[in-house]
Amino acid sequence: MIGGKTAVVCGYGDVGKGCADSLRGQGARVVITEIDPICALQAAMEGYEVRTLEDVVETADIFVTATGNKDIITADHMARMKHQALVGNIGHFDNEIDMAGLGRVEGVERTNIKPQVDKWTFPDGHAVIVLSEGRLLNLGNATGHPSFVMSNSFTNQVIAQIELFTKNEEYERRVYVLPKHLDENVARLHLDALGVGLTELTGDQAAYIGVPVEGPYKSPHYRY
Amino acid sequence: MTTTTAAHALDFKVADLSQAEFGRREIELAEHEMPGLMKTRARYADRQPLSGARITGSLHMTVQTAVLIETLAALGAEVRWASCNIFSTQDHAAAAAVVGPEGTPEEPRGVPIFAWKGETLEEYWWCLEQALRWPDGGPNMILDDGGDATLLVHKGAEYERAGAVPSPDSTDNEEMQVVLGLLGRSLEEDPQRWTQLGDGVLGVTEETTTGVLRLYQMQETGQLLFPAINVNDSVTKSKFDNLYGCRHSLSTASTAPPT
C-alpha cells in the first residue's frame, strides 16, 4: 500500500517530478530531497516537503532515487530505516543506492523474495526491501514506460538517426540537439490519437509574436 | 536459452523463441499506441533513408523497443541490438524481434538480438560486444541509452592507442572490472578492433540524461570520436518520457512487492 505512507523521492528533475506525482496520486505523503535550489523551490511550490535524507531516513516508508548521481542512499542509511522500508532506484545506473556497501555490512542477510525483490535483514532484526538490486525499478519490477510516451522518445531517435546518417557531413564531433521544428513535429504526430484540437495562428497573430504560422513557435531558450 | 545454430541465417541469443507469438501480439497492440513511429514509417517508406545504415542499438529490449527496431528496419537499416540493463529485457519482445513479423521460431527472419532478463554483468557486456561486432566489421551508427556502447568503443580505442588495458584489479568497481577484462582480451585478439570500429561510426544518438552527460564530458575533453545527437533534450523526450513515463511506471513497479 502506498496511500498514507511517507515516500521520499531523491532528486526533483523531470524523472523525480514524475515519481513524486505518481506517489502523491496514490495518496503517499511525498518528501523531496534536492541539491539544486531551483528544483527544491519547485518542489516546495508544488506542496511537497523538502528535507535532507538524514531528516527522514528513520521515519519514511518508501525511498526512490532519481538523481543520476552516486552514493545517494548508503548502507548506513539503510541500517537506520524502518523495518521493511522499500528502497528502489529509477536513475539510469545502479550506483545511486550503495548495494556493494550493503553487501559488506557485517551480519547482513539477503533473502530473495521473488525475482528482483530482495529482503536484506540487518543483525538487529530489521530489514529493508530492495527492488531490482538497485537498478532501474520500473524496468526490473514492471514493464517500463507505456508505449505512447515511448513513441515520442523513439520518434526522436529515428529522426536523429536519419539526420546523422543522411547529413553526416553537416555534423562535427560535437553533441547536438534536434532543431525545434522537428521536436514540434514529433508532438504533432501524437495529437490525433488523443483527439487534440490544435488552434492555428492567423498570419496577423504570427507576425505579432514574430513566428511563422507553421512554427517553430518558441525561442531556443524557452523552457516549456 | 536459444542461441544461433548453423541452420539459422541469424546470429542471436535470447531466452526463449517460443515466446515470439506472445511478443508479436503485444507488439501489434503497441504499434497502435505508437503513432509517431508508425507515421514515420509511412512517411519514409518510399525513400528508405536508412538504407545502408548498420545500427547497433543498446537500449532496454522491451515491446516498445521492438517497434523502434522494426521502424529502423522498415526505413532500410540493418540492426543489431543489446539491452542496456541486465533486468530490463522482456523476453517475449526479444523473441518476437528475432523471429520478425515474417519469420517463425524455426526460421527466424527478424533482427539479431542479444538480450535476456537477468543477465550477469559478464553476459551483459558480452551481449553488447556481440551487438557491436557485425559479420563484416562494425556498425556505422550507434543508438545508445546510457552510453555503454559509446563507452565501450571509446575506451577500447583509448586503450588501443595506449597499447595496454589497465588490469581489472586496478578498480573496485565490479562492472568496470568486467569491461577491463573484456577489453584486455580484445586487445590480445586484435589491437586495432575498437579503433577501426570507431573510425567507421558516423554518429550516435543518445536516449538518456546519464548518457548525454557522458557525451558532453567527452566533447569538453576533445575525446568524442564521432558526432552525437542528444535525443534526451528534445522537449518531446525529456518533458514527456522522463516525466509522464515515470509517473506511470513508478507506481506499477513500487507495488511489485507485497507492501
Image: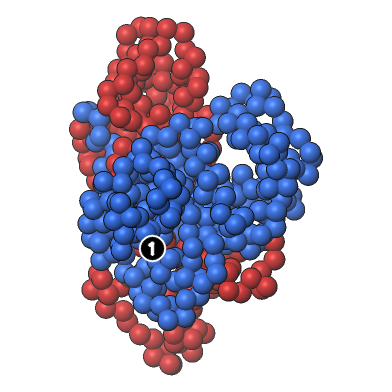
Chain colours: A red, B blue
**Image quarter in which the N terminus of chain A is found:** top left
| Left or right: A193 in relation to B40 | left
Q: Is residue B38 visible?
A: yes
Q: Is residue B22 left or right of residue B16?
A: left
Residue at image coords 69%, 27%: B167
Q: Which of the two residues, B196 or A6, is positioned nearer the viewer here?
A: B196
Quadrant of the image occupied by residue B129: top right
Q: Is residue A146 visible?
A: no
- Residue placed furthest toward the right: B162
Image quadrant occupied by the C terminus of chain A: bottom left
User: Residue furthest toward the front?
Assistant: B7
Measured from the top left, where is residue B105 in percent x and y?
29, 51
* Left or right, residue A41 beside residue B104: right
Q: Where is residue B181 in the image (x, y as percent from the top left)?
A: 62, 31
Front residue of B67/A74: it is: B67
In the displayed structure, A101 sits above or below B214; it is above
Secondary element at image label 1: helix
Say which residue appears at 40% left-offset and 29% top-offset.
Answer: A133
Circle 1 chain: B
Rendering coords of residue B148 (x, y %): 55, 45
Residue at (34, 13) in percent of width and height: A121
Residue B205 picture quarter: bottom right
Looking at the picture, which amino acid does disc 1 mark?
Answer: Glu
> How many dots with numbers?
1
Question: Callout 1 environment at 10 Å: few (<14), some (14 to 19), or many (20+)?
Answer: many
Residue B195, position as x, y percentages in the image: 71, 50
Q: Name the residue under label 1.
A: B70
Say which residue appears at 49% left-offset and 25% top-offset.
Answer: A98
Find residue A201 and report its image quarter. Answer: bottom left
